[in-house]
Image (spheres, coloured by chain):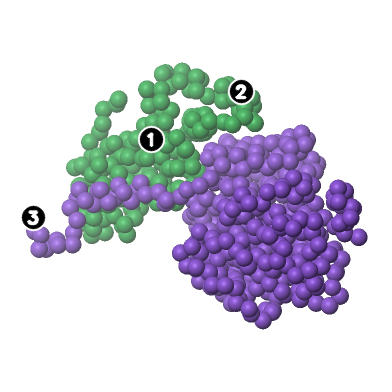
Amino acid sequence: MDYTMEDTQNSAPDAVGESKLNSSAPRNDTQSVTKRLQAELMQLMLSPSPGISAFPDADGNLLSWTATITGPTETPYEGLTMKLSFAFPNNYPYSPPTVLFKTPIYHPNVDFSGRICLDILKDKWSAVYNVQSVLLSLQSLLGEPNNASPLNAQAAELWDSNQEEFKRHVLARHRDLDDE
Amino acid sequence: MSNSANANALSTEEMERFQKLSNEFEPDVKGPAVSVKQSSHNIALEYANADPTLAAKTSALALTHPTTRVMRGDGNCGWRAVIFGYFEILFNLRDPHRVQAESQRIKNLNGLLDRVGHQQDIYEIFVDETMDIFTQTLTAIQNGVHDESFLVEALCNENQSNAVITHFRLLTSAWMRLNPQDYQAFLSLPVDQYCSTRIETVRTEIDEVGLQALVVGIIKDAGFGVEILYLDRSEGDAVTPHPLTTATPAGATIRLLYRPGHYDLLYRPEVEVNINPMVNYQYGMTTNYAPWDQGAAHNFEISPQMMAIPNLMADPAFAMGPDPMSPMSSVSPAPASPYQPSPTHEMYPTPIQSHAPVPAVPSIPAPSPPAVQSSAPKPMMSLPSRTSDGPQIRMNPFAMKASLNRALPVTTPFKNSPYNQAHFQNQDFEPIHWEPSDSRR
């Protein structure tokens, strides 16, 4: 319910009005980041993708979001829910957000601090990627790790050699985070 | 612990530190995203002490393309150069209808974005910024503004620049995805993958295939030409031109200077400069030549064109200047060979030269004219030929092969010279009313 309230505050009327009025004035960056993130939020609300969700943190700062991914079926992560944090830079979307797994996860491309090795979050970032496409990419990364450049070498090895043992590690490391 | 076993391995802390450094690495880029127009001599100066081929080519370049605009080397320079060039031409054409037509045409290209599946609410933000530049251009033309600094500002504004570049990247990528048969053969990876990893990214430099697609898919239909001038160490005395469009119309061609990994903009001599009354005015006003120094010489953008005036110094008519204090007084008033070295040989050492003193100009035989000759600007071609024999273009010392590998054009003697009036051989510029006895016929 908090969510719906915030949504009406953050979205359309203000953003549209501003863009019309200031269309030829020098705009400031924060305004354009805000506009973009509001558009993304809107899209996530209107057409949610199964298995992923994201929302700005409750502190009212639109530059930091919390997201969740549900583990894809027929992967070691099936049935698990992972939390992630998104921190958007001031020049978003022209620089990628910093994305971290908050839920402890055992995965070849994620280290024990939750940092992720994924090219689209680094030099292959494009301004057309968004929270939704990043989350979908991460979801598919869960089922298809890139073992060529692992952050967790043991996990990469185990993924290739012993799926049973891999899944045991996944479940051992996983710990549901409390809400908030 | 096991130092012997892991002699080469780094501790976790070190690895993390390096990873952090690597993640945060930003190339050392400086300067504005788009510079003001500046003299191409600056490019020649950069190469003055470099490989002789590069020095020769850049010196010749300063004559054929006297001005340049430097793009910041931040991974978007090629994109920014083309986009800036596009808007600048549109502005300089000063046709409000054309601006509107182009604005509509680019907006209609949204269809390409839809066809490859981009979401409108995502790309709209980029398109809006491009449309804003069209609006600014139109307003400027309608208000009689002739200064393009609003365009420089727009593309130096980080947000707007990023948005517009992203817009053109997306258009280019959509064009390639929809016409893969034209590009696949030139790529080492599938078109889709090429587009998502090289074109749609935020800081990947444009390569030749991408540039071709940008020009053919997006720019060409404006009726503008695009030409790349390659500066490399290949054989020759001049940069290698490579037109990307079948036509390169004068006044509507984006000229890119390519150096490996970097693009800047280049400009041919402007017609307006040759007839600009300001220059004449300055000539009339200036009575004291002493203060002109080296630094000023480089900022004087007219010089290269002066230097290229056919037969200027060979013409006795211009040696009878009314002003005896002119530094040109060493010129023989007698008709001279078109190749006679001009008095600019009495040059001031440039800062670079001060470390490596310039030898006196060797009395070399007349060199064969380099390629610069053929690309002399139109207005100069229309000047009457003063000597019936000899080429139309009188080679000045900077175009001479033997002097090309030296550092650089010091054009001070021309700058304030009364001989400048030769530039204005039309009725409007017969200014010497105060000394009728010295009038030039």
Q: Which chain is purple?
A: B
User: How far across and how far down the image is residue B223, in percent?
Assistant: 76, 54
Tell me which chain the residue with mark 3 is part of. B
Q: Secondary structure at mark 1?
A: strand
Residue assigned mark 1: A87
Q: What amino acid is found at the position of numbered circle 2 in the picture?
A: Gly
Are labels 3 and 1 assigned to the same chain? no
Q: What amino acid is found at the position of numbered circle 1 in the picture?
A: Ala
User: How far across and how far down the image is residue B408, in percent?
Assistant: 58, 64
Quote the CA–CA distance across marks 3 and 2: 63 Å
Quote the CA–CA distance across marks 3 and 1: 37 Å
Residue occupying image coordinates x 38% and y 44% = A139
Tell me which chain the residue with mark 2 is part of. A
Q: Residue furthest left?
A: B1
Residue occupying image coordinates x 49% and y 42% = A94
In the image, is B254 to the left or to the right of A94? Answer: right
Which mark, residue B1?
Answer: 3
In the image, is B367 to the left or to the right of B407? Answer: right
Q: Secondary structure at mark 3?
A: loop
Instruction: Report the front residue among A70 and A145.
Output: A145
Q: Quadrant of the N terminus of chain A?
A: top left
Instruction: Report the front residue among A136 and B308.
Output: B308
Are labels 3 and 2 assigned to the same chain? no
Which mark, residue A17?
Answer: 2
Chain A: its colour in the image is: green
User: How far across and how far down the image is residue B158, in percent?
Assistant: 53, 40
Q: Secondary structure at mark 2?
A: helix
User: How far across and how far down the image is residue B398, in percent?
Assistant: 64, 68
